[in-house]
Image (cartoon, rainbow, N blue to C red):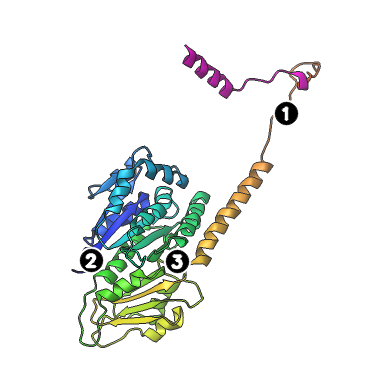
Amino acid sequence: MSLKSNIFCLGLGSAGGKLYKKMLDFQYKGAAGNGSEQDLKALGDVPSKFRLQGFDGFGGHRDKAVDCLAENEEFLDFVASIKEKIVFVLFGGGGSTGSGCAAPVIETLLEERDESGYPKKIVCPVIALPSSNEAIIKHRSAYQAVLELQDLDGIGATFFIRNDVSEDYEYINATFTKMLDAFLSNESVCETNNFDTSEKKEMLRNGGAFVLSLFGSGKDPKLMLDKLTQDGIFAPIEEDKVCENIAIVHAGRDSRDITDSDVIAEVGKPGNVFEGFNGKQTVIAVSGLTYPVSYVSKLGELAQEAFKERQRNKKSSVKKLGALSFMETEPEKPDIQNMPKKVSKLDMIKKMQAMRENQ
């Protein structure tokens, strides 16, 4: 059985649904889950769309996920019944449905364990991080989502997509899915060396961040490495030189556009180096990296600073109309302390509602 046939892609929320749709272009199995009927309709005629009943979107409140999933037991039952051994959970960190549902959905997938306590499935989150100019709540949601991912026991490799790299999210999604498919579906054969299925699974099984780079023959190695580690569609890697695995599938049968030493100089010395030849393009993959804490922390700091600025603006902009005299003589000022409290419109509405209930 090929690796590709044992993979399932689960898209959560709007961003996750769009990534799932892109994976369908490469014939992967999967499903989309969302509370928003409009978001699901926007995906068009794709298979396996689950409507989370009672929650037509979360309106930016990711904390609604617990109530939503509690009321949609059939969706979690479906998640638990996924038979494929490798599951990619796709979602937007800045959203509310995907961001909020991701952790409990991943926990559901990890529940089934072997006798040693290891998860029977390899579960790999794919989180799209919001761009720096998006709303405060999106930065806050993404920060909270990554915090939750860090605490999950037995989680596989995590892919951190950086939406800051372009305003064209369609391009980012297409680039990611193309690179992921190039990694997963590569079955090139060469007498020199081959990158096989067990090695791919090993890379996906390792926790931590995962980055990819994909290039045609003859590309500048420095450009390839920059795209892999700093300037590509993934969040910039940490500078601690911590990684577990490096894989390079070369486009040539015996030529190397880039060497493992080139990659090691950028990402650190790994436990394993896997190498293959005769690929359609050169693929570089690194797994077991430290989470991009520096980048995600900046998102949290942006949210924090924006929140503080809003609070300052609110305090400085509180203005009330002063009293104006429309008479020739100033009337005697009323005794404000002893005046009856003015009934608010909300109080009036509540009284009307109470009266209707008692009728």
Q: Is residue 231 left or right of residue 37?
A: right
Q: Badge 3: how crowded within 10 Å, few (<14), some, or many (20+)? A: many
From the viewer's perspective, is residue 45 above or below residue 171? above
Marker disc for residue 4: 2
Please name the amino acid that badge 2 sits on: Lys
User: What residue do we see at 27% from left, 67% from top?
Assistant: 181
Marker disc for residue 295: none
Q: Which of the pair 51/121 is nearer the observer? A: 121
Residue linked to disc 1:
322
Query: Is the stretch drawn in magenta largely helix, strand or loop?
Result: helix
Please name the amino acid that badge 3 sits on: Ala
Q: Secondary structure at mark 2?
A: helix
Q: Nearer the viewer, mark 3 or mark 2?
A: 2
From the viewer's perspective, is residue 117 above or below residue 92? below
Please name the amino acid that badge 1 sits on: Gly
Q: Secondary structure at mark 3?
A: loop
Q: Please report the bounds of the magenta region as a residue range.
A: 337-359
Q: Which of the pair 272/117 is nearer the observer? A: 117
Residue linked to disc 3:
235
Instruction: Give the mark, 1 or 2, whose residue is nearer the N terminus.
Output: 2
Q: Based on the displayed image, in which of its 4 quarters is residue 216 positioned?
A: bottom left
From the viewer's perspective, is residue 351 above or below residue 188? above
